Image (spheres, coloured by chain):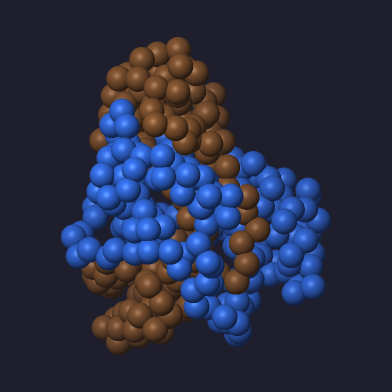
Amino acid sequence: MDMNVIPHPALDDAINRALLQAIERGLPLAARPYAAIADQLGVDETEVIARLQNLQEQGIIKRMGIVVRHRALGYRANAMVVWDVPDDQVAATGCCLGSVPFVTLCYRRPRRLPDWPYNLFTMIHGHSREQVLARIDHLVNSCGMRAFAHQALFSQRCFKQRGARYTTLDTQPDTTP
Amino acid sequence: MHAQAVQLTLTEQRLLDEFQHGFPLEPRPFARMAQQLGISEAAVLDSLQRLQAQGAVSRVGPVLQPNRIGVSTLAALAVPAEQLEEIAALVSEYPEVNHNYQREHDYNLWFVVTAPNRTRLDAVLADISRRSGLQVLDLPMLEDYFIDLGFRLQWT
């Protein structure tokens, strides 16, 4: 299992790296955000836009847009639902789960036996616990998962939440509202 | 934590529905959004600033594919109840930790660690294990099956 950084030619480029570093905490909320980033990097606005387009086409940027905080919007119930799926079925099951609208993450991770038997991880948000449980039932039926053990780990308290910062790690505490 | 959900106008609901992906790549992206929503560019910027200040919007920007710029892992600890606050605070101290949640399970503290490389990641996990006296469950992502188009909000 290679758990190191997956190389990509677009990321050997110093300007691309500087660009991602400049925007990973968000674009400036100003009329011309790309021009502001361009000034910071010493390139022009057109180049910033073209590079972002390219990074999206390459899949390095999965999406560009508004990143919401579910909880603040009334999604009080959120569960990390973990599944024990046979290895030869995990890709098909993962693709099925990953395409359901209310599933917000779908990752395969290693089992750690005997402590941890689950290898497929999904996040499910809802307005209530009942709604999340009903959604889990829906997944069990629609992705053919009746034979697979699962557990729903509802979140109880958030101690910290912010976007991942891959390129710069500051030491300032980031408090969650 | 919010006692109450942030209240949104109908236009703000549309803003969050329509621009979680496909953010305009053109010199004045907020003006383009404003045009689609039938409001002014200044109103779009005002709404985003307000929603960010109130905690409903984390940021406007990119969501990166995992493990390209750096590496990350999902980690968990089984913390005795009486030590939970103390250990949670210890974990949150690390700038490499970006999410840290209490969840209902024997493994009751779950956090995401992100670092420039696996060596640094391992060092952070080892340090947390040493300081907490607990064994860390380390669950790095192996495959990503999720096509991220943002979160489909329901307003009913």
Name the quadrant of the N terminus of chain B.
top left
Q: Is residue A135 left or right of residue B151?
A: right
Residue B4 visible: no
* Total numbered circles: 0
Q: Is residue A85 above or below residue A30?
A: below
Q: Residue B45: x, y in percent?
A: 31, 26
Q: Residue furthest left?
A: A172
- Pick whichever, B72 or A33, lies toward us: A33
- In the displayed structure, would residue B148 be above or below residue A111? above
Percent across and percent down for residue A141 are: 78, 50
Chain in blue (letter): A
Residue A173's spot in the image, x, y percent?
Answer: 20, 59
Left or right: residue B43 versus residue A71 is: left
Q: In the displayed structure, does residue A117 sit left or right of residue A125?
A: right
Question: Residue at left 27%, top 65%?
Answer: A169
Q: Which chain is brown?
A: B
